[in-house]
Amino acid sequence: MMMAAAKMENLEIEHKYVIDPKVFPLDKFQRRALELAPEGESHVLVEDTYFILASTKTHIFRHRFDSEIQNLTVKSLTGDVDVRLEVNLDLDQGKGNQLDRVREFLRPLGIIQEIPLKKEVHAYYLKGCEAVYYKASGAQRSIFCVEFEATEKTTLESSKRIIAHYENEFGFNDIERASESLFELLIVPQLPKTILQSLTLR
């Protein structure tokens, strides 16, 4: 299986929660994160551009650009939503937003659709885990999410234990988590049937 073959460093291991900001506001998340003495923190406005390609039905490509990071990522669309293939290629921030070059790089693979997404991200870098609170906005709606992503990935089991520890610390251990990726939550609902037929989703 793909997940069994993928190196741990190329797996995204995370739990996502779609939240009501009135019930769990940002300031509550920030207070708890700071109490846990993070190694660092970040607040960035992110421009994501997703590409659906004719050459693959099971993977999506994403260009990310913000004040700290710029990369091109391939993500799996099938299988476990909590453990997915994610391979990042870092791009040179010194050359500015390279979306145009990414677009030309992917064009020979057959770009079916290009979809922009914006996120306002508050991230806290805890020991072995990144805790993130963000607002993601697509063409039709916005959602608020909290994510716990393992950054210490020795084994799948140890990564899941780290995530479970921080879910408990933030009070999320008894809350139902999202069963869909952000791509499925915000982008898939706006896609026409003809394009959906070009994808293999869970």
Image (tube, grey):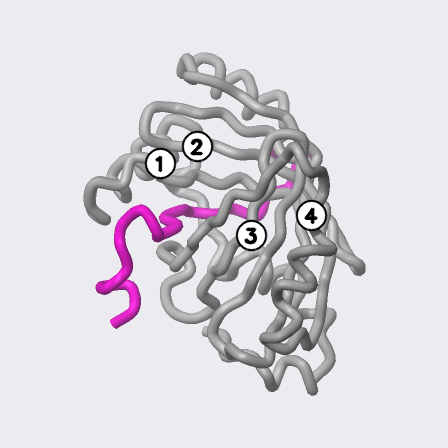
Give the image location of residue 115, x and y in percent. 72, 62
In the image, 97: left or right of 130?
right
Q: Quadrant of residue 145?
A: top right
Between disc 2 and disc 3, whose residue precedes? 3
The residue wearing badge 2 is 130
In the depicted view, which residue is nearer to us: 164 or 123?
123
> Disc 2 versus disc 1: distance between alpha carbons?
7 Å
Report the Cα–Cα distance between label 4 and label 1: 26 Å
Residue picked out by circle 1: 151
Write the residue at 50% across / 75% down: 201
Residue at the (55%, 25%) spot, across then down: 29
| Foreground pick, 95 / 6 | 95
Which residue is at the front of the view, 65 or 167?
65
Looking at marks 4 and 3 on the same chain, the residue that comes earlier in the sequence is marked by 3
- Secondary structure type for disc 3: strand
Task: Give coordinates of residue 151: x percent, y percent.
Answer: 35, 36
Asked whether residue 79 is in view, the answer is yes
**Disc 4 designates what residue?**
98
Label 4 with label 1: CB-CB less than 8 Å: no
**What is the C-alpha distance between the residues marked 2 and 4?**
26 Å
For disc 3, the marked residue is 72
**Pointer 3 local density, CA inside 10 Å: few below 14, some 14–19, many at least 20:** many
